[in-house]
Amino acid sequence: MEKIVTFGEIMLRLSTSDYYTINQAHSFVVNYGGGEANVAVALSHMGHNTYFLSKLPPNQLGDGAITHLKSHGVNTDYVVRGSSTIGIYFLETGFGGRPSKVIYNRKHSAITRIMEEEFDWQEIFEGATWFHLSGITLALGEKVRKVALRACQEAVKYHVPISFDFNYRSKLWTIDEAKPVFKKFIPYFDVVFASFFDANTILDIPLDEGLENATLSEKRRNVFPKMIKKYKLSYIFGTDRVVYSATENSLAGYYFRLNGTDLSWELTEPIRFNIYDRIGGGDAFASGVIHGLLKEFNNPAYAVRYGLNTSVLKHTVYGDASVLNCEDIETFMKANGTAEVVR
């Protein structure tokens, strides 16, 4: 049976209501979310068998996170319990010209006490079909990175494809702190979700002389083939976002693939949309791409469209994760003319 494993932190989300700022708020709306947990939830709603690997405190807050995951069909057998604190983030939802704001409170959360000896790695990865990880998780401390590295090593051992979302967050660590960690991990990955910034600034993939004033798309076409070749990646995926206001954006998706010296790439047409809840849009894109690749690994054009439409629809759903099934997504793809892919 198919088995998708994701590893990361699930947090308690406390959101202001009615577009209040955090300092105006007298109460908060409670939800749960986190990058890899969101991917597991979204893929579960797409019909996949998903497992979440993490650590949560043995109290009611940890129980609430477990209940959240189980309610969306995510298997929590690989969530160990310990410590006393759950990661928390506060969300101030933007409106008009005022952007959303996030404040983290996760420095001493349970996952920062995680240890590789707490898991049966053979049970986790034997028979698994996909493993997903993000840079946010790698920013959570040395103990978390040790477990993440062990997970990547076990995935490679059992021939499990690994996807990785760079998700660099300056609120969690500096570029200088992130660089050696990303460079250490990236040789393990097959599919990455990355931007020009990730390639050029974090991985130090150089831009050719004379391209400093080139368009962003031209810069990607210059550095991504070098990145794919250097790290033997199968694909790079990502999105271009245009912000018209806090409640109206557009998204386009792209992919890059290198076969020998033959580069194939595409930047899709953008989709413009209104926003109900922006959080988790990138995770929804990743989940849609993973779903598309699991269906047709040699058809990245289909995968990027699936990811793009999943992400756009996620912006209309409250909470961190997409809860839409394949019928919802594919109906939307047909409605906006992105379902057909020229092979």
Image (tube, helix red, strand yellow):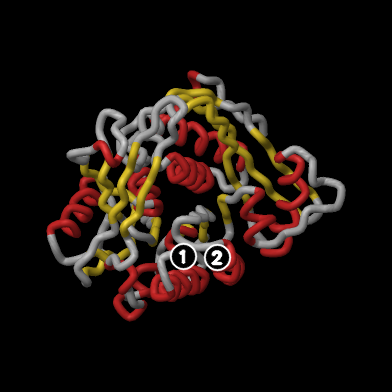
Tell me if residue 256 comes above or below residue 111 in the rendering: above
Residue farthest to the bottom? 117
Task: Give the number of the mark in front: 1 or 2.
Answer: 2
Question: 26 or 135: nearer the eye?
Answer: 26
Mark sitting on residue 178: 2
Between the residue at mark 1 and the residue at mark 2, the CA separation in whole angstroms equals 8 Å
Tell me if residue 12 comes above or below residue 232 in the rendering: above
Residue farthest to the right? 210
Residue farthest to the left? 60
Tell me if residue 129 comes above or below residue 183 in the rendering: above
In the picture, which quadrant includes the C terminus?
A: top right
Tell me if residue 14 comes above or below residue 58 in the rendering: above
Q: Is residue 125 left or right of residue 226?
A: left
Please report the residue visible at 49 percent of the width from the left and 54 percent of the height from the top. 169
- Relative image position of residue 120 (x, y in whole percent): 32, 75
The residue labelled by disc 1 is 138
Q: Is residue 178 left or right of residue 284?
A: right
Which SS class for mark 1?
A: helix
Q: Amino acid at mark 2?
A: Ala
Kindly check if marks 1 and 2 are in contact, taking CB atoms under 8 A apart as contact.
Answer: yes
Q: Is residue 332 visible?
A: no
Residue 337, picture quadrant: top right
Of label 1 and label 2, which has the lower sequence position?
Answer: 1
How many neighbours does mark 2 have within 10 angstroms: few (below 14), some (14-19), or many (20 or more)? some
Q: Is residue 314 left or right of residue 229?
A: left
In the picture, which quadrant includes the N terminus?
A: bottom left
Please report the residue visible at 69 percent of the width from the left and 49 percent of the height from the top. 257
Please report the residue visible at 47 percent of the width from the left and 23 percent of the height from the top. 273
How many neighbours does mark 1 have within 10 angstroms: few (below 14), some (14-19), or many (20 or more)? many
Residue 53, picture quadrant: bottom left
- Relative image position of residue 91 (x, y in whole percent): 33, 43
